[in-house]
Image (cartoon, rainbow, N blue to C red):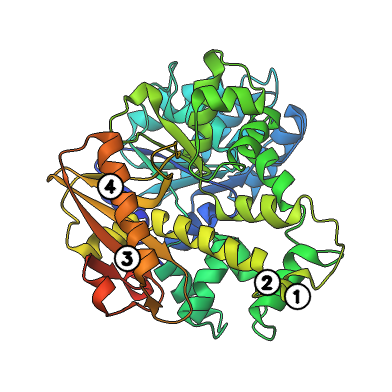
Amino acid sequence: MIGRIEEKKRLLNALESDESQFIAVYGRRRVGKTYLVRETFGNKFTFAHTGLAKKNTREQLHNFQISLRNYGLKKTPIPENWLDAFDMLATLIKQSRSKKKVVFIDELPWMDAPRSSFLSALEHFWNSFASARKDVVFIVCGSATSWIINKIVKNHGGLHNRLTGRIHLQQFTLCECELYAKKLRLGMNRRQIIEGYMILGGVPYYWSLLDREKSFAQNIDNLFFARDAELKDEFSELYASLFQRPEKYLAIIEALGRKKAGMSRTEIVKESGVPDNGRLASTLSDLENCGFIRKYTCIGKRSKNAMYQLIDQYTLFYFKFVVDNLVNDEHFWTKSIDKPIYNTWCGLAFERICLLHSRQIKAALGISGIISSEYSWFVEGDEKNPGAQIDLLIDRSDGVINLCEIKFSKSTFKIDAKFELSLQNKRTRFIETTGTEKSVVLTMITLNGIYRNSYSNEIHSQITIDKLFTF
């Protein structure tokens, strides 16, 4: 298994507990939740079951009966309701001779059909049976992350504070993508892996679709622009699988996709048309829990003035090149390489990758143990001063701010007089605008480092892509 070291450890630790364990595994679609659980336990379950998509209660119960029979409860009728179904599961668990009874229910949200009383039956099963024993490891999982969060993790009813563990499965890092690419024998160097991350993010399933007999550009054409491209329709399926009513989520995502640094809550309401009511906060929280957006607060701002930024690489690529692509060219991506639109996109996408790998950047700077906030920053120009935009700020609790300039340059980046002046202007405008009393130092993040000359002396530290490929 690539990566997932801590997640696997947490699942295995449940086997050593003296009490029954109730664990929720959640995360965006295609991130490998089911694979993690099945590989960790070697598919050795007392009971395992997967809910059916878009089926009614009767069909779900019939499917549950089939799983019960497959795991040893041979003479069992179709349950009349979910209380009966979970009672049958309890009978199966009692019959098991395993030291630990590992029960895995995948796609749990799909089982909660309207008026099915599924959740109350689940609560009864855990509270009256499983939690009273010492030997049950109950693991639930599902693509509908908002359901898992709201109905299980943040449950205010019978399951309130009943979870003993939760695993929010994240996308692969660059390092993990590199290991996976080697396992798939894709023959990609680190620059190519970064370009892959710009499009596919760290979603293992998307990487598994790459054909090692084709170039990376050909793969992207096949996945996004060919007539039957596998990932062309993934966008609608992705959000529909995560949220029962995806329309408002999509409206927010589309609005955020138009602004690099993100939007405030007020701006989101204005640009998306989603009303600013009690549900907006939970909608934004759902998107954040799924890993599509991040919430951050700029220097000098209060938490109520937080910004929301779209960070999902696949979604950003889809908005930029797929959704409004009218060219209808199956070789669109291959022909776009090194064109102005491609080069501009590479620069912006690389900035987002650096933001997503701020932990690795901090490690390279030797400041891993220092609390910090990371965000981009900009200020508009006026009659006296030019505008300024900063790719990444690392605002540290030790009285220092790293002003990071990020450049996606194929060769060693050379700082000239004009660029050096631009850096100093950014630094000056940031200090004057924010009124910060912290020390502001300049950091360069590039593919292959910077060329040392008289203009590079002001650079406090530099980071190359190799530093991003660490755990």
Instruction: State which quarter of the image contains the C terminus.
Output: bottom left
**Mark 2 or mark 4, which is nearer to you?**
4
Q: Are marks 3 and 1 in contact (CB under 8 Å)?
A: no
Query: What amino acid does circle 3 point to?
Result: Met
* Separation of residues labelled 1 and 4 (CA atoms): 41 Å
Q: Circle 3 — which element?
A: strand
Check disc 1 and report the residue beneath it.
335
Check disc 3 and report the residue beneath it.
444
The vertical placement of 111 against 50, above or below, is above
Check disc 2 and report the residue beneath it.
339
* Separation of residues labelled 2 and 1 (CA atoms): 8 Å
Q: Position of residue 283 (x, y in %)?
A: 55, 27
Q: Nearer the viewer, residue 77 or 402?
A: 402
The mark nearer the N terminus, 2 or 4, is 2
Please say whether residue 453 is visible from this viewpoint: yes
Q: Residue at x 23, y 67 (%)?
A: 461
